[in-house]
Image: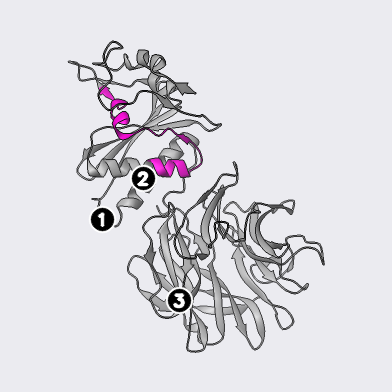
Amino acid sequence: MRLRLLAILPLLALVPGMSAAQEPTEGVRVGITYQPGVRPGMLVLGGPRTELLDSVRTIVARDLEFSDEFEIITLPAEDSLVLGIQTAAGSGSEFVNYPLYGALGADFAVRARAEDAGVVAITVYDVRGETVRREFTAGVPVLSDPDFRMATHRMSDEIVRVITGTAGVAATRFLFLQGRRIYRMDADGADVQPVSPDGAAAFSPSWDPRGRRAAYTEFHDGGGYLYLQELATGRRLRLSFTQSALNYTPVFSPDGNRFAFTRSDEEGTDVFTYNLESDCCLQRLTSGRFADNLSPTFSPDGRRIAFSSTRSGLPQIYVMSADGTGQELFAPFDYGVTGSSHAPEWSPDGRSLAFHRDVGGTPQVFVMDVATRTVRQLTSAGRNEDPTWAPDGQHLAFVSDRTGRRQLWVIDLETGRVRQVTRAGEVRLPAWSGRMY
C-alpha cells in the first residue's frame, strides 16, 4: 500500500486541531510506504515523551515484531506523536483516529501511558472494529532496576495474548555456552549476563521449569560435576551424587522434582535420573556397555524420556518410559543412509520432537511429528544444530554458522521466518526458558 500526501490529508483532517488546509507540522512526514503481509498490521502509538515511556514503547514494538504475529508499522518518532491519541479542544475527551490508523495498514494499535509512579497503562485498540480491545495496567520499575526489561516483556506478552489468545514469549530467556562460561540473556538478545563463574570450564546448561535456577556441568578435578544455581542470588549447589565420573546434559522433569542426565564412566555412557525433591534415589535407566546413551529430554507430562543412542551404529533418537522400560527407536532413519542424530528436545505441547541430524556430513535441524513419526528438515544453509523450543511451541532456536560464526537464530515454524539473535563471539548449546511470570 503506497500512501501519498493527497491520500492521507483527508484523514489528518480528522485529528482535532488539524485541517486538510493546514500545512503539516514541521518535520512530520505524512507520506510513507508500507508493504502489508498476511499478518495483521500493528501500530505502536506515540504520546508524551519520557525516557521510561520511550524505552517501554521501543521494547514493546520489538517484542511484538519478534512474536511473528504482526506486521509492525514503523514510523519515525515525530510522526508517531502526531498519530497519538488526541484530546478534542475544549471537551477533554479523547479522539482515536481509527480511519488514519487503518489507512496506514494497522489492524491493531497499542498505546502506553504513565498512570502513577511505577505504573504503566496499556490500551489495545481494534482498528478495524473501531473499539478498545482491552486496557490493563502493569507495574514497571525505574529504568535502572534490573527487572525493568522483564516487566516490559510481560506487558508485551499480555498484548499478544489479548489479540491472539496465547501469550507471547518475550518474557523468556536463553542460557548458552560462550567460550568456557554459561551466560543468560533476554529472548530479544539483550541484557547478556554471565552465570557460571570465570575459570572452570562449563557445559550443557538447562533451566528449571520456573526459570529461577540453572543446571550445568563444570569440568575440574578430573570429573564433570553438576551444579544448581539460583539466578537471582548466584547461590550455587554442587550435587553430591556427581562426585565421580563425567556427568553432563542435565535436564529437569516438568514438575522440577527430578533430574535426568548423562554419566560416562568405566561402565559406559548412560542416562540416569535423580530425585531432587528427596535428594536420593540415583537410578540408571540404560545399559551402555556396548553403546553410548545420552542427551535425555522429558516429555511434557514427565512420563517418557527421549535420548540419543549408538546402539544401532551411528547415534539415533530413541524413547523410553521415565523408569527406563520400553526402550525403542523413536525417530525413523534409513540404515547406512541417514546420518547421526543428536540433541533431542520435546516440544512444550508434546506433539513434536526437535533434533539435529547429519545431512551429507553437515548437521541440520529436524522436527518429528510424535503421532505419525514423520520427520521434516527445517534448515539447509550452513551448519545448524542444538535446537531448543520456546514455550509457545511455535518458535525454535538453534545454533547456526550461516554467517560465518556459530550464532543463535530463531525460526517461526508457522511462517518459516528466521532471525538472528546473537552477533558476538561463538554460541553453543542454547536452552530456552519457560515464561517468567
Which residue reaches farthest left?
A: 90
Asked whether the residues under the numbered discs 1 and 3 touch, taking CB atoms below 8 Å apart as contact, a structural biologist would say: no
Instruction: Please give left or right for residue 77 compared with residue 215 in the image.
Output: left
Give the crowd class for mark 2: few <14, some 14-19, many >=20 residues within 10 Å: some
Residue 352 shows which numbered tag?
none
Residue type at tag 2: Ile
Return the residue nearer the eye: 50 or 388.
50
Q: Is residue 277 visible?
A: no
In percent of width and height, residue 287 lies at: 70, 79
Crowd band around label 3 with a 10 angstrom C-alpha radius: few (<14), some (14–19), many (20+): many
- Work out whether 217 lies above or below 305: below
Element under disc 3: strand
Query: What range is drawn magenta here?
Result: 61-86
- Asked if the stretch drawn in magenta spans residue 320, the answer is no
Q: Earlier in the sequence, mark 2 or mark 1?
A: 2
Percent across and percent down for residue 111 are 33, 33
Label annotation for residue 59:
2
| Residue 227 tag number | 3
Q: How far apart are labels 3 and 2 at the CA level?
A: 33 Å
Which quadrant holds residue 13? top left
The quarter holding residue 9 reads top left
Q: Which residue is mark 1?
A: 145
Q: Residues within 10 Å of mark 1 (few under 14, many from 20)?
A: few
